[in-house]
Amino acid sequence: MALELKTRENIRGIRKAGRVVAACHKALSNRLAPGVTTHEIDRFVERFMLDRGATPAQKGYKGYPFATCASVNDVVCHGFPDSEPLESGDIVTIDMVADMNGWKADSAWTYIIGKSTPATDKLLRVAQQSLMEGIRKALPGNYIGDIGYAVQRRAEREGYNVVSMFVGHGIGRNMHEYPEVTHYGPPGQGVKLEEGMVITIEPIVTTGRSEVYIARDGWTARTVDGSWAAQFEHTVAITKDGPIILTRWE
C-alpha cells in the first residue's frame, strides 16, 4: 500500500476534526455517571458532532450501526452501545471518529463510572501512560516498532498485557490508511516514520491475558478470561518538531 504524506494544510484539516473529537470527550467526561446508558452516550456524541458541522465517521462504516464504540469492562473494543445502565465501578471506553470537511480524526478514552478502586485507577493510569510513551517515539527516522516497544514495555513493567489483535493506523481522508501501527515490539522494525505521516496510536491494556474473542454480533471483542481492559487513543501528526497530538484535550 502507498504511504500518503500530509501537507501542513492537510494536517490543519485533520486538526479541525480532532478539536471536535476532543471537545466531545471533554463534554462526555462531565456526563458519565451511574444510570447513564451507552445508547444515550451514542446519541449525545452524534448530536454533538452534527451541531458542530462534523459527522460521525464510524456510523455506516462496513455496516457498523452506531456513531461510537462503547466498550464496558471486559470488552476491549468495538462494543455496541445498548440500553443497559452503567453501574458505579464500571469502566467504559468511548471510541469516536469525526469527519470534518472530508478529514477524519480518531480518539478513544476510558472513563470510570462513579466510584473507583485502586486497581481500576492503576489500570487506567498505566494504559494512558503506555499511550504517551508510544507517542514520544513518534519521530521522523524512528520506526513503528519503536512505538510498539515503548507501549509494550510500559504496560508489561506494571504486570499488564497489551492486546495485539488490534492496531492503530494511518488516518486522513480515510478512517483507516497505511500503515498499521502495532503496540508491541521489537524496536527498530516496521515502517519508518516520516514527516507528514498522521497515525493513530491506540493501545489496549488488560489486567489479564491478551487473547480476545469476537462475539456473535461480529464486532464486540472481549477478553477470553474476563479481565478488564482500558484503551486510550490519539491521532498524532509526525513533524520535524516532534509529535503533535491532534485530538488532545485536558
Image: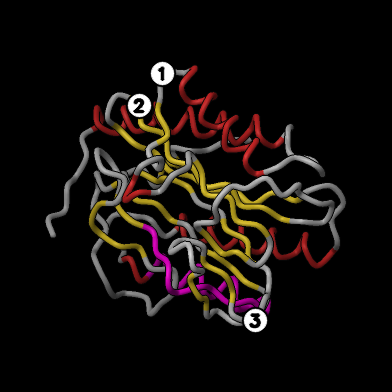
Q: CA distance from mark 3 to mark 2?
A: 39 Å
- Using the image, tell me which numbered label, if any, was put on residue 100: 2
Q: Earlier in the sequence, mark 3 or mark 1?
A: 1
Residue at the (49%, 57%) spot, across then down: 78
Q: Position of residue 221 (x, y in %)?
A: 52, 67
Of 49 and 104, nearer the camera is 49
Q: CA distance from mark 3 to mark 1?
A: 41 Å
- Using the image, tell me which numbered label, if any, was put on residue 176: none
Position above or below: 3 against 119? above
Q: Looking at the rendering, in which quadrant would you find the C terminus?
A: top right
Disc 1 crowd, CA 10 A, few/some/many (<14, 14-19, 20+): few
Query: Which residues are drawn in magenta?
Result: 146-168
The residue that mark 3 highlights is 225
Residue at the (82%, 56%) spot, across then down: 89
The residue that mark 1 highlights is 53
Instruction: Tell me if residue 161 is in the magenta stretch.
Output: yes
Q: Position of residue 174 (x, y in %)?
A: 26, 43
Position above or below: 220 against 101? below
Q: Position of residue 228 (x, y in %)?
A: 68, 69
Of 191 and 118, nearer the camera is 118
Residue at the (49%, 68%) spot, across then down: 216
Foreground mark, 3 or 2, reads 3
